[in-house]
Structures are given as C-alpha cells and as structure tokens.
Amino acid sequence: MSVKFHIAFAESATIKGGLAIQLKLSGDAAAAGASVADPQNVATRAAGIAKFKGKAMKTLDIIAPQGSPADRLVVIGLGKGDDLTDYDWLRAGGVAAASVKGMTSVTIFLDAPGLSVNASQAAGFGLGMLLRAYSFDAYKTKKNDDEDGSPKQVEVTIVTADPQAARTAFAGSEAIAGGVILARDLVNLPPNVLGPVEFADKAKELQALGVEVDILTEKEMKKLGMGALLGVAQGSPRPPRLAVMQWKGGKGKEAPIAFVGKGVVFDSGGISIKPGAGMEDMKGDMGGAAAVAGLMHVLAARKAKVNVVGILGLVENMPDGNAQRPGDIVTSMSGQTIEIINTDAEGRLVLADALWYCNDRFKPRFMINLATLTGAITVALGSAHAGLFCNDDALATHLAAAGEATGEKLWRMPLGKEYDKLIDSKFADMKNTGGRLGGSITAAQFLKRFVGDTAWAHLDIAGTALNSPSSEINQSWGSGYGVRLLDELVRSHYED
Ligand code: BES
Ligand code: MN
Ligand code: ZN
C-alpha cells in the first residue's frame, strides 16, 4: 500500500485515537508500556502473554488497548540498545512505517525507560519511515488502496526531547530520502521509458536545486575522442549522452570531489548477447548512474559545503548490424587502445572514457565510480556487500566506515600487477576482459588504467543495486544503494 507520511516533531502529544508507537529495550521487562501511550500498562501484560522481550526490530501489536486513548499500540523492540548504530535507527523507523497499516494518525514516543534519543537519531528514525514508505507502482493500473490511487496521507507526530533540533536534522533526512527515492525510481523504470536521453533529462531536472548540468551529445563525445564509450553505444538507435553535473557548495578555488556512474540503460550484452533468462534485470544496469544522480540531489538539497562533480555515462548496449564486434579495436579518450573480446564487458568501456574525462577536465581530489560492473562480484559477495577497489588506503578506510554506519556495506577487494597483466592484449594496449577467474578484479584493473595517479575507488554494486532483498527500509527492486553511503562519506570527511 502506498502511503505518504507527514512527519512533525513535538515535545509531547495527547493521543486521540489512532496508532501509538513506543520503543522498548530488551531485558527491561517491566517497562514495556510505561508511557503516556499506555497509562494502565496494558502493554506490559500483553508483552508477558505474547512473550515479547523487546528483541531488535520485533514488534508487539495491541489492538484497542484497554484504558488507552490509542486505537492501537505498537511496541518496537530495540534489543539491548547499547550499540545502536545510525542504521539501526533507520531500521526502527522502517519497522514503525510497516506497522502503520491502515492508520492515518500516528504518535511515536521515542524515549523509553533506559533510552534517551538524540535529534540525529530521531531524524534517522523519520528517514527510515520515508524510505520504507516507497513503492514503485507507477505502472500498476489497478490500485488496491483508495479509489483514486493516490497515496494515503498519514499524519505522524514524533515525540522527542528536543523537537527543534530534530526538525533541523530531519531537513537533512528529507534531502537524503529525495535522493534515494530518485535513485530507486531510475533503477525501477522500464528501459523503453528510460533511455540515455531520458536519463539525461532527469539529470537536467537537478538544475532546480542549483546543480549545474551539461549534457554532452554524441557529436561532442566524438570530438573528445571517446571511442570506448561510443563503441558500446553504436549498436543502439538511441544516442548516448554524458551528463556532467556540478554542485559548487564549497570554497571557490577548492578542487572538487568526483563521482562517476555507469549508466547502461539496458545491457543486452550486444553481439556477445546474454542468455534470455533474467535479461530483464539488465534495465537496472544504470544503478551506478542512478546513485550518482541521487547523491547530487542530496548534496544540493541539503546545500552541502563542498564542490562536487557527478558524471553519468549513459548508453544502451544492443546487438545490431552496426553494433561493435568481438575483435574490434577502439581508441579511448586517453589514447589507449582496447581490443574488444566480449561486447558484454561494456561497462568498463563506458567508464574508461567517463573517468578519463572527469580527471582531465576537473583534476578532482578523488574519483569514486559506481557500477553494476560484474556478475563475478555477486558470486564473491552476494548482496550484503558491494565490492570496493581502491588505490588509496585513507579513502578506502573512510568508505568502509561510511558503509558500516549506513548499512550500505563494502568489502575491500585486491588490486595488483598479477591481475593487471591478465588484460594485456596481443593486438592493442589492453583487452576488455581478463578471463573467467577473478572477473571483478580484472574489471577493476581495467578501470585503473584510466585514472592516472588520482585517488580513486571503484564500487562494484552489481549485487547491491538491483534485485535487492527486502529490508526494514527497502521493499523495492532497486535499492538506491550508494546514495546514503556517499552522503555519509562526504558529510563526515569532505565538507568545509
Ligand atoms: N551489467 C553486467 C554485470 C551485471 C551482472 C550487473 C548481473 C548486474 C547483475 C556487465 O556488463 C556484464 O555483462 N559483465 C560480464 C563481464 C564478462 C563478459 C567479462 C559478466 O559479469 O558476466
Ligand atoms: Mn554487460
Ligand atoms: Zn553491464
């Protein structure tokens, strides 16, 4: 069911019907219902009967609690509560959102016995609610909600000690939610609707937030010598685009930080065509570009004090009489030549020119690229971690820490000359695949040949951006992975 939450913060609230939500730590047996929501301690009794102990993210749901002004009372467990991460507060908010069901008025009491919740945790809780509420139903013509299909409006009051501070922090949460939802929408959209040009138009819309956006056409890319990116695009009647976004929130002269996204709007494999089963998932092969667009949204919406460049390589990879062939040799913008072994290893070709262009034009402090680059990374890491490849230990450490804080986790993978030599080619400077073994590493080595000495990280998000397992804060196929991770990175290390 699609809902829209209007979230307000208050120091106290009087419940007049509706849903009341409170939190509970485990091991605090007597205190399940000791709050204004439950003057007669119905919850304590119910918890005893249901054997509800307050384990993390478990709920106790009481309908028409006797003696309470609430129509329903939900208690959310937080576990022991001594090592709650920022991500746990999002999850708790997600659980709260899932508990709302048909109610239209919700009052949430964050403080509980043994638990005093600060403003940023309260804002995180609200963010978790917004993220959980997302559902992609633009193409469902039969709405099972209200007759008109518009989302149900739900009034939420979060009761917390310092509502003013929570409100300020929550403005940042709303910026983040906007960016994550943008990324999810882009990944979920069908490939007939979202081509390279349409994606570039979505990037243009960020101008409304103060982002400068240039869209490079095929002609301009030809002039720049982007033979690697253009070779991928040539099999599709839909022309490629390179979206160049700039957010100038930092000091005038400060070099920017840069994010580059793989935006293959559909990856059929090209002439090295993929098997049919599951090919529809390749509409999500622009998850890297979606995350970069989402991040730019967040940074602009919260007016981040930093100079940022975001670049999207937007192409479609299709088989065609004019498509690139295995055996072709293309010349990248860097001047390096590439022998095409497999036209399905197209993401690295797109990124080769996008990374080189980014480095050449902007001289950034670092570049981070995000890409649904290899099936091999899903074999190695599943969907719980994205692969992290990095030539700079400090940047890798910052990224991994941001992953732990946000729950968008990263696992560092190796780089090395043993892997690099696997992509040397008999006929050109390099080839675009390095064989079956270590497939995500040789893909990373390929990218590394286009970043010079600039600090750089490659996040292989093939296992995390699409086909995502449901979580407390996401029920959507496209997760929006990377937006919260990189916002956290920027916020904690790179703002003035
Ligand atoms: N877009 C795919 C990788 C992918 C796989 C993304 C599954 C999301 C889910 C990429 O372009 C690709 O086809 N990679 C090949 C590389 C191979 C031909 C060297 C792969 O991983 O099989
Ligand atoms: Mn491919
Ligand atoms: Zn691909």
Image (cartoon, rainbow, N blue to C red):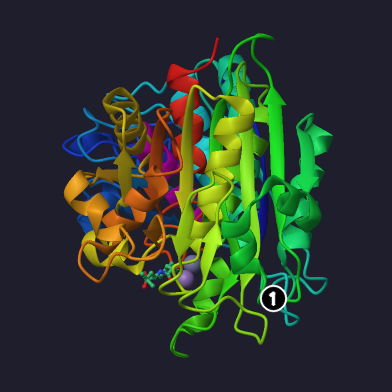
Q: What secondary structure do most residues of the magenta stretch adopt?
A: helix
What's the residue at 79%, 40% (across, down)? 214
Disc 1 Cβ-to-ligand 3 distance below 8 Å: no
Q: Is residue 83 above or below residue 343?
A: above
Q: Position of residue 166 (x, y in %)?
A: 56, 21
Out of 125 and 429, give the one closest to the viewer.
429
- Looking at the image, residue 105 sits to the left or right of residue 445; the answer is right
| In magenta stretch: residue 87 | yes
What's the residue at 43%, 35% (across, down)? 39
What's the residue at 64%, 27% (across, down)? 171
Q: Which quadrant, please, contains the N terminus?
A: bottom right
Q: Is residue 294 above or below residue 267?
A: above
The furthest residue to the front: 427
Out of 106 and 483, give the one closest to the viewer.
483
Q: Position of residue 48 (x, y in %)?
A: 21, 51
Q: Position of residue 308 (x, y in %)?
A: 61, 27
User: What residue range appears in magenta?
Assistant: 86-100
Q: Which quadrant, please, contains the C terminus?
A: top right
Q: Position of residue 474 (x, y in %)?
A: 47, 56
What's the residue at 40%, 73% (across, down)? 341
Crowding at label 1, few (<14), some or many (≥20) Cα neighbours within 10 Å? some
Count of labels in the image = 1
**Would you name the residue on which mark 1 appears?**
236
Regarding mark 1 in the picture, which secondary structure is present there?
Answer: loop
